[in-house]
Image: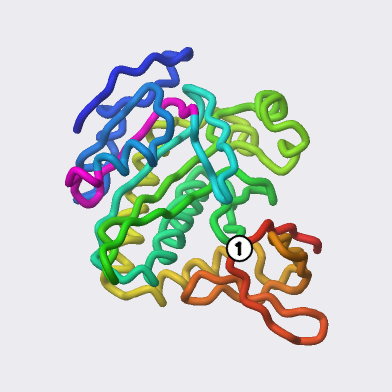
Amino acid sequence: MSTHPALVSQAEERLAIQQIRRTLATERVGFQTYLFGEVGSTNTVLRRLADTGAPDGTVVLAETQTMGRGRLGKPWFSPPGLNLYASVLFRPASPPSAVPVFSFISSLALTDAIWAEGLPAGIKWPNDVLVDRRKVAGTLAAYASAGDVVEYVILGIGVNLNVDHPTLASALGPAAAAATSLREAAGRRIDRNAFTAAFLNLLEKWDNEYRTHGSDAVLEAWRERDALAHHIVEIRGPADTYRGRAIDVNREGRLVVEDARGARREIVTGEIVIIE
């Protein structure tokens, strides 16, 4: 494993490769890990490593990001020394149509890691993880392909671990009402090194599940953690707004919504608001 010098305001909160390795039980994920003090984004760093031959399971961690992005290009608030900002590389040799399963895998690993902290967590399509109906984490899958074969998939992960609500409110404004952290929800500090190791262990577990049993097994587990199922939702897209009941998520990673007349629509993208 490789380490990059990190300058963090709270030394006691630092991530440390040696600490993570104490409970890391993987064969591939995290075998090669890079830890940085500050980066533009962990995804950008890992993409460069992937393009120069980094192996399957390579992980990039950072204490802070200056240009972290979430879904729809939104900035991801990344205060130093408090949370988890990570990117993980997979080389699945799959068609591009299989990429959505990696979003399922990362969301499953996150919810399981959060449950292990004693906090019930659910997944809000497509890639938000909720505790008490407020967002604590998000994932983003990006990929590169050659023809009809994926060369690599990069999973970007951000988890609010120890950031407090006043800090969130100062950075996010009114949007902070829909966000929280594990520390706020649990009422105690979260060990970032232990959580990182637990998440990476679970990520490899779910990747192995996919490799062994296929996407249907992963999707079935994802559905059990679906925070939107049977709720009335509003989808705010670039062209229109649509309201209906969330019915399912299909193999292609699309949200299936049924309107009041019983007509169904497959949603590819959009802002999702739970109405009831």
Q: Nearer the viewer, residue 75 or 57?
A: 75
Q: Quadrant of residue 35?
A: top left
The location of residue 62, given as percent across then percent down, is 39, 29
Residue 105: in magenta span: no
Q: Is 16 left or right of 270, judged from the image as shown?
A: left
Looking at the image, can residue 25 be seen? no
The residue at 40%/39% (across/down) is 86
As shown in the figure, which amino acid type bears the numbered disc 1? Thr
Q: Is 147 left or right of 155, judged from the image as shown?
A: left
The location of residue 241, given as percent across then percent down, is 77, 65
**Marker count (numbered):** 1
The location of residue 239, given as percent across then percent down, is 72, 64
Circle 1 is placed at which residue position? 269
Looking at the image, can residue 147 be seen? yes
Work out whether 195 lies above or below 164.
below
Work out whether 252 lies above or below 99.
below
